[in-house]
Image (cartoon, helix red, strand yellow):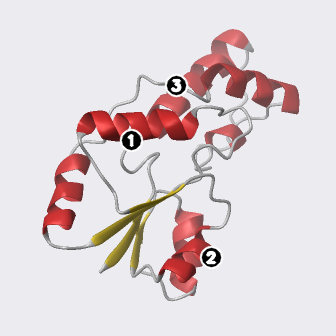
Amino acid sequence: MKIGIDLDGVVFNTEMLWSTYAELYDCIELNRNSVITKEEPRFQERYDWSDKDKEAFLDKYADITEFDMMPGAKQVINMLKEEGHELVVITARGAISNQKEGASIAAQKLETEGIKFDKYYWKVEDKLQICQNENIAIMIDDDWRIIKKLSDNKIK
């Protein structure tokens, strides 16, 4: 079976780090508490930040390197590979203009961890299109809106 896998928030704990840094940035550097909604999956949209605030945050934090693997991610990826599944990375990582090294940082982390995927799609804006083109049977992602869109189009 062909399985698509997102990286940030699924394989890497980067979403947790970005959320933490966003909270610190909002409270300490901007000296406010401008949370609009905690339910927003994209940390950049959780706050009432100006475009200048977002750019400054992303300039400072878009290419963080201190992230770890999500607990159990390596074991599950290895298990799926051993079962003979084809694993395809489908990620928006690197799509943010401030994230100049995003893909190479992630690729290096995967190499360090000894994790290999069969194919990689970086800077993906439309995961549905890639999933359809690749005949992905299952997509693992942490954004409920992406999952809903895929599910509405018969991708589990």
Residue occupying the point 48% across, 32% down: 105
Give the x, y percent position of residue 102: 56, 36
Residue 117, label in figure: none
Residue 51 lies left or right of residue 115; in this view the side is right
Residue 64, label in figure: 3
> Which part of the image, by quadrant, shows the N terminus?
bottom left
Residue farthest along the bottom direction in this orientation: 154
Give the x, y percent position of residue 37: 65, 44
Identify which amino acid the numbered label 2 is placed on: Gln
* 3D distance between C-alphas at marks 2 and 3: 28 Å
Residue occupying the point 57% across, 53% down: 122
Picture layout, residue 12 above or below residue 119: above
Do tag 2 and tag 3 residues touch (Cβ < 8 Å)? Answer: no
Give the x, y percent position of residue 131: 52, 76
Picture layout, residue 150 above or below residue 91: below
Q: Is residue 33 visible?
A: no
Q: Is residue 149 visible?
A: yes
Between tags 1 and 2, which lies in front? 2
Identify which amino acid the numbered label 3 is placed on: Ile
Residue 16 lies left or right of residue 125; in this view the side is left
Few, some or many residues within 10 Å of mark 2 (<14, 14–19, 20+) = few
Residue occupying the point 34% across, 41% down: 110
Residue occupying the point 29% across, 33% down: 112
- Residue that mark 1 sits on: 12
Picture layout, residue 4 above or below residue 66: below
- Residue that mark 2 sits on: 129
- Which SS class for mark 1? loop
